[in-house]
Image: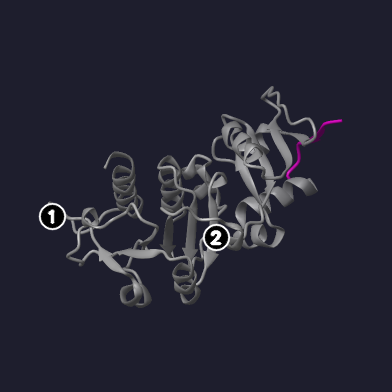
Amino acid sequence: MINKISSKDNTTFKYVKKLFDKSSFRKKEKKFIVEGIREIDLCFKSKFEIESIFISDKKNQKFNYSNIETIVISQDLIKKIIYRESEGIFAIVKEKKQQLSDLNFNSDELILVLENPEKPGNVGAIMRTFEACGFKNIIMIDAQIDIYNPNTIRSSLGAVFQLNIFKMNSLDIFDFLKKHEFKVYSSFIKSKMKFTDIDLKERCALVMGPEKSSISEIFMKKSDELISIPMFGNVDSLNLSVSTGIILYEAVNQRKFS
């Protein structure tokens, strides 16, 4: 039997709305909202557990997820939950447990380290580029941002579900990287070392700092090299997702075509 929700006073609707609105509640429940058929399908294929799927009463969708609860919700209510109301579908998904200790690194592994990223949309765009480059592991340092923020998921186009994403603090990251023999290259706008002049074919960690400030002192002191992207116009900085993408594709270029 398919349940139906047509009132904002419905207990399930209130629960879903709270999941959508409050990062603290998502963290407590270890669940998040995913909207869109493509993104839900990526969740399923990436072995995330989908708790339930909600479909607008104005849509007639068919799925191959016969073991997942399906709930019909009025179009007026679904507008309060998702951005892309034209698709008329979203799901409640449980977080996947991942441990850094479970990973086996390749000899040329490239890890992306994001120090205190501030904008969910930028993080999602970075995830999309990172996955497109064929890399898999991201570590977020001292991050307050919610990995499963709706803006992050939407901007990543589902790439967030195909990556291994972890959180650490700045005091532990260097012990971890040293233990696994990673070279550490940190982006620093004042560095004289161009990003094209370092060897990105080896096992390395690329560190990108916050949108509004530079990398912290610990990365200044302990990185193997500080690198920069040359600027030829009047602006003195690039958007975080753009600068990250430029360096990642240099790594791809070195690995695939050199």
Which amino acid type is shown beneath numbered disc 2? Phe
For disc 1, the marked residue is 234
Horizontal side of 116 relative to 197 (left or right) equals right
222 or 32, which lies in front? 222
Gap in angstroms between the C-alphas marked 1 and 2: 36 Å
Q: Residue at x 67, y 49 (%)?
A: 17
| Above-or-below relation of 124 to 142 | above
Q: Residue 8 versus residue 251: which sits nearer the camera?
A: 251
Q: Position of residue 66 (x, y in %)?
A: 78, 30
Instruction: Identify the secondary structure beneath mark 1.
Output: loop
Q: Is residue 95 above or below residue 226?
A: above
Could you tell me which secondary element the residue under label 2 belongs to? strand
Q: Measured along the vertical axis of the image, is residue 171 above or below residue 141?
A: below
Return the residue found at the far right. 1
Magenta residue check for 5: yes
Between residue 189 and residue 173, name the one nearer to us: 173
- Considering the image in quadrants, where does the C terminus appear? top left
Tally the numbered discs. 2
Relative to 232, is 178 on the left or the right? Answer: right
Residue 88 spot, x, y in % from top left: 62, 31
Question: Horizontal and vertical percent for residue 169?
Answer: 50, 72
The magenta-colored residue range is 1-8
Residue 123 visible to the viewer: yes
- Mark 2 surroundings: few (<14), some (14-19) or many (≥20) residues within 10 A: some
Q: Looking at numbered disc 1 in the image, what kind of residue is underneath it?
A: Asn
Q: Position of residue 236 (x, y in %)?
A: 19, 59
Mark with earlier residue (1, 2): 2
Name the front one of labels 1 and 2.
2
Query: In which quarter of the view is residue 45 placed?
Result: top right
Q: Which residue is mark 2?
A: 166
